[in-house]
Amino acid sequence: MLNCLASERARADVRLPALFADHAVLQRDKPLPVWGWAEPGEKVTVKLGTEGGDVAAGKDGRWQVTLKPQPVSKEPLTLTVAGKNTITVKDVLLGDVWLCGGQSNMEWGLGGCDAPEDIKAADLPLVRQFGVELHFATTPQADVRGRWAVCTPQTAPGFTAVGFYFARRVHKETGVPIGLLRSCVGGTNIELWMSQDTLMNTPALAGYGKLMRESLATHQKDLAAALPGVEEWAAKSRDALKAGRPVPLPPAIPEFPFGEKMFRPRCVTLHNGMIAPLVPFALRGVLWYQGENNAGGAADGLQYVEKKRAMLADWRKWFGDPNLPFYFVQLAGWQKPSDQPAGGDGWAHVRDAQRKCLTIPHTGMAVATDVGDADDIHPKNKADVGDRLARWALVSEYGKTVVPSGPLFRALKIEGNKAVVEFDHVGAGLMVGRKDGRKPADELTDGKLARFAIAGKDKKWVWANAVIVGDTVVCTHPDVPNPVAVRYAFTMNPVGANLYNRDGLPASPFRTDDW
């Protein structure tokens, strides 16, 4: 009887999602949704800083109050939510919230980066992380599991390393508190992070949607077959409760067919369990590091642009912001380098597709080919990656005057036997550079450009004689008198690629052809 009373009281209590907890960072300068659950019809009052509001819980017990925008608050605020009971959330800051998503390279903790000095100096009380715990689900969930952690030398090893370095630079240059929502899982396809509706109704994802429909149909048949046993158990359980006897064990209920690997097409569950429950939490933007699991070859490269376009549209719809900034990492170099001028091996095509994703509005890309590790798919240098993502945000979101990117291919012009490559983001000018670990790239004044390939209509690739001329790179070869195409660093691990701008940022791999 006491347990029953406790259960009834718990259902009547006002509750908040895990996101609204001590040490949270909430989004400044935007309408701020605060939501939770209470007894249907119960009046709930919310107060934070100078703003407040009240609302009655709906028939399903859910309530939501959207507070008016408030400016940055570095001083801790208290969030109070009151109904029949009162919840007090302490040490709340108003700053910028960045959702950190993707695969294991985003999940990778600072503690695994051989960065003891950075950890020792990580006394950053205005930088905080909410770590979303792994959760597969067949339907959109109401809440996540996780907690907020203030960045200290003790907690920093558990922070997403990419997010940490991003937050550290942005906070240092702006003074704005930064909240990181780490919601990522290693070994996952981009499809896993989209809603089922998007997967099943986006033409470019028709094959994946078909598999999803088949999986759901099979699951529904299995459930229907098990239903008579469940109904019989329910009847016996009611009789046992009335008679004061122990309730019998329930029958086995078929689980959704996840498969042996979490990235198989029919396992479309991470959006349900780790993204949908975050909505409508107010965000400043998204940081994304993913693609390894979608890098199967040329066909995957062609599809990846449309997949990412679908995912961005999906997330922007769910979070109610059609212009939600989305800054992502181009895949780092990995495995044994190839000496074939044509390239096209391994991740080359998906890496080029990632570059083409910059055509999607409000996006930016951090190039990472020069900070990879031939022997480790998880390169330890996440400092340059986070710094390069921060550059895009500093320019686009904070109005800072910095160069956001290394050279990005813009156009190819043919002038006789010369293939002239033009670039965006040349910054202070182009240079032949050398990167050594986390040290800034050095200019090699007597160095030669490498990893440029050139071809004519016969599609036979040779290494080009490439030289910097002003803000362009001019490629020639005596065996290609009439060039039509150029490729740069178009291989799995383009060791030796050395085109940089004088701001120390590497050029993105690219190709001008569609062969």
Image: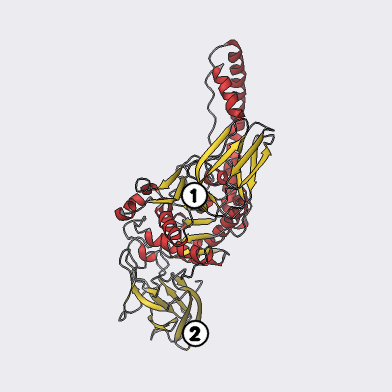
- Residue ID at (63%, 53%): 320
Residue 364 in the image: state x and y as whole percent.
50, 64
- Front-lying residue, 418 or 66: 66
Residue hosting label 2: 414
Mark sitting earlier along the chain (2/1) = 1
The part of the image, by quadrant, that contains residue 65 is top right
Mark 1 Cα shell of 10 Å, populated few (<14), some (14-19), many (≥20): few
The part of the image, by quadrant, that contains residue 329 is bottom left
Q: Secondary structure at mark 2?
A: strand
Residue type pointed to by label 2? Ile
Tell me, yes or no, if residue 298 can be seen here: no
- Numbered label attached to residue 75: 1
- Residue ID at (60%, 17%): 236
- Front-lying residue, 275 or 72: 72
Tell whether label 1 touches label 2 (CB within 8 Å).
no
Q: CA distance from mark 2 to mark 1?
A: 59 Å
Which color scheme does this rendered protein use? secondary structure
- Front-lying residue, 9 or 464: 9
Residue type pointed to by label 1? Glu
- Numbered label attached to residue 209: none
Q: Secondary structure at mark 1?
A: strand
